[in-house]
């Protein structure tokens, strides 16, 4: 049966990140599954984003959770956490 894969992130905004948009996404073997979720950072709020997708996992699948910053049409991957199914 498919497994529920979830990835989440939170961001506490300060002057350095105020106004930036972050996206969290799940990738299996380099292909994004489901839709990534975005969160906007303001100077006074805590932002949170969660994405989840059912996926039938197989041996040697590589699951990535990626967080990227979207600014001025430039995507910068800030975090890439990886899990390999053995």
Image (spheres, rainbow, N blue to C red):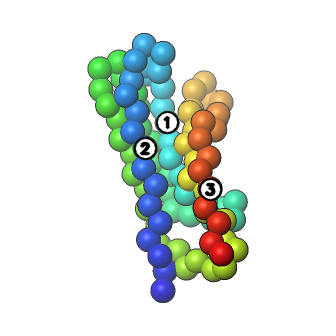
Residue name at image x 64 percent, y 34 percent:
76
Marks counted in the figure total 3
Residue at 37% x, 28% y: name it.
Answer: 12
Q: Position of residue 66 (x, y in %)?
A: 58, 48
For the C terminus, which image quadrant?
bottom right
Choose the circle earlier in sequence order: 3 or 2: 2
Task: Please tell me whether residue 45 is drawn above or below residue 49 in the rendered image.
Answer: above
Circle on res. 9: 2
Q: Report whether residue 32 is seen.
A: no
- Residue 79 occupies quadrant: top right
- In the rendered image, residue 48, in percent from the top left (x then y), is placed at 35, 41
Q: Secondary structure at mark 2?
A: strand
Local packing at callout 2 (Cα closer than 10 Å; few below 14, some 14-19, many 20+) is: some
Residue 82 got which mark? Answer: 3
Of the two numbered discs 3 and 1 on the same chain, state the one appearing first in sequence: 1
C-alpha distance separating marks 3 and 2:
15 Å
Task: Please state the horizontal and vertical placement of residue 11, each as a whole percent of the image.
Answer: 40, 33
Taking the spot 47% from the left edge, 76% from the top edge, the residue there is: 3
List x then y, in percent, for residue 47.
35, 35
Determine whether label 1 and label 2 are within 8 Å by CB. yes
Q: In the drawing, does residue 84 fall left or right of residue 46?
A: right
- Please tell me whether mark 1 or mark 2 is closer to you in this view: 2
The image quarter in which residue 52 lies: bottom left
Q: What is the spatial separation of the Cα atoms under label 3 and label 1, in whole angstroms?
A: 19 Å
How busy is the neighbourhood of tag 1: few (under 14 within 10 Å), some, or many (20 plus)? many
In the picture of the structure, the residue carrying the numbered disc 1 is 22
């Amino acid at each position: 049966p498919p497994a529920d894969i979830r990835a989440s992130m939170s961001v506490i905004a300060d002057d350095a990140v105020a106004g930036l948009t972050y996206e969290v996404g799940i990738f299996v073997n380099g292909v994004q599954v489901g839709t990534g979720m975005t969160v906007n950072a303001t100077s006074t709020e805590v932002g949170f984003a969660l994405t989840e997708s059912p996926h039938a996992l197989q041996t040697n699948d590589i699951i990535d959770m990626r967080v990227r910053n979207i600014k001025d049409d430039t995507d910068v991957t800030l975090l890439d956490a990886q899990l390999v199914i053995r």
